[in-house]
Image (spheres, coloured by chain):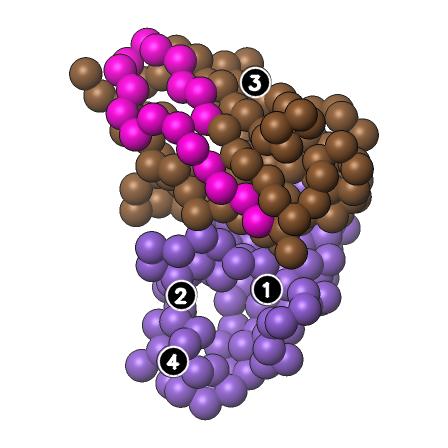
Chain colours: A purple, B brown
């Protein structure tokens, strides 16, 4: 079965750029979405189709996808961005989520 | 604005069948302009896709659930439903319903989520 691998945790200082990766076999050939989930809340879509931002998502969130790795980039990270982030893609007949990355804003 | 609200039991016994509903507001399900999904999250763990009902009415399920899951739509009530049979403790999770714009599987995404329904499987 297809797997998406994310680092368990990423730390970033306020105002700096946070990079969260998601790896999978030939992932660049698939569309990737990213979700943000804060404690006790439902997930929120922050990026879809690799690099598209839904309405209401700040411009500091961006995405890319090439080769075997998709990347979520948060520029000028703010304290409010501290959350778990999940990547998602479709393979064959299954929608797959990555294991999630906890972003800590120190 | 699309809103979803799950409802169902909080506690179910092992081997029993779970039935959850999701009331959709802001759009009529019968318009067939959205894909609908069920996703679950065990306590302290990540997201797991259960299945999707596409705008066309077709469905797809996570093979790992081994045919225990069944999704359906009740257009008269504007509700989605999920049943999951032969429950074990490993099915303990927050169950979410979610919706995303009409698209094929490769473009599947969920823009709107319910608040989740915690289901504990225990005797």
* Discs 3/2, front: 3
When the figure is inspected, residue A96 is found, relative to residue A61, above or below; the finding is above
Give x and y (percent) for residue B25.
Answer: 61, 44
User: Which residue bears the numbered disc 1?
Assistant: A46
User: Which picture quadrant has residue B51?
Assistant: top right
Label located before the other in sequence (4 or 1):
1
Q: Is residue B12 magenta?
A: yes
**Discs 3 and 2 share one subunit:** no
> Badge 3: few (under 14), some or many (20 or more) residues near its Cα, within 10 Å?
some
Q: Chain of mark 2?
A: A
> Badge 1: few (under 14), some or many (20 or more) residues near its Cα, within 10 Å?
many
User: Which residue bears the numbered disc 3?
Assistant: B70
Numbered range of the magenta stretch: B3-20
When the figure is inspected, residue B50 is found, relative to residue A46, above or below; the finding is above
Label located before the other in sequence (1 or 2):
1
Mark 2: secondary structure: strand
Horizontally, residue B7 falls left or right of residue B43, namely right
Q: Chain of mark 4?
A: A
User: Which residue bears the numbered disc 4?
Assistant: A79
Structural distance between the alpha carbons of marks 4 and 2: 9 Å
Q: Which mark is residue A83?
A: 2
- Residue B11 shows in the view: yes
**Discs 4 and 2 share one subunit:** yes
- Residue A33 shows in the view: no
**Discs 1 and 2 share one subunit:** yes
**Extreme-front residue of the structure:** B76
Mark 4 near mark 1, Cβ–Cβ under 8 Å?
no
**Discs 3 and 1 share one subunit:** no
**Extreme-left residue of the structure:** B123
Q: Identify the residue at horizontal 40%, vertical 19% (top origin).
A: B18
Q: Nearer the viewer, residue A17 or B41?
A: B41
Q: Identify the residue at horizontal 33%, vertical 55% (top origin).
A: A40
């Amino acid at each position: 079965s297809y797997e998406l691998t994310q680092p368990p945790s990423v730390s970033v200082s306020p105002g700096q750029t946070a990079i969260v990766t998601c790896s999978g076999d030939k992932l660049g050939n698939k569309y990737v979405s990213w979700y943000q989930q804060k404690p006790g809340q439902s997930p929120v879509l922050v990026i879809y189709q690799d690099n598209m931002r839904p309405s209401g998502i700040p411009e500091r969130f961006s995405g890319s996808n090439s080769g075997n790795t998709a990347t979520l980039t948060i520029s000028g990270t703010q304290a409010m961005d501290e959350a778990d982030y999940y990547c998602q893609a479709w393979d064959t007949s299954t929608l797959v989520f990555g294991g999630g990355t906890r972003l800590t804003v120190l | 604005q699309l809103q979803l609200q799950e409802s169902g039991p909080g506690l179910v016994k092992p081997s029993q069948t779970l039935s959850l509903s999701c009331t959709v507001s802001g759009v009529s399900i019968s318009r067939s302009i959205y894909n609908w999904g069920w996703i679950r999250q065990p306590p302290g763990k990540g997201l797991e896709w259960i299945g999707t009902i596409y705008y066309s009415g077709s469905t797809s399920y996570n093979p790992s659930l081994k045919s225990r899951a069944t999704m359906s739509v009740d257009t008269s009530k504007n509700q989605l439903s999920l049943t999951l049979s032969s429950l074990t403790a490993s099915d303990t999770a927050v169950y979410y319903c979610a919706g995303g714009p009409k698209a094929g599987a490769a473009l599947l995404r969920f823009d709107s989520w319910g608040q989740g329904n915690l289901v504990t499987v225990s005797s």
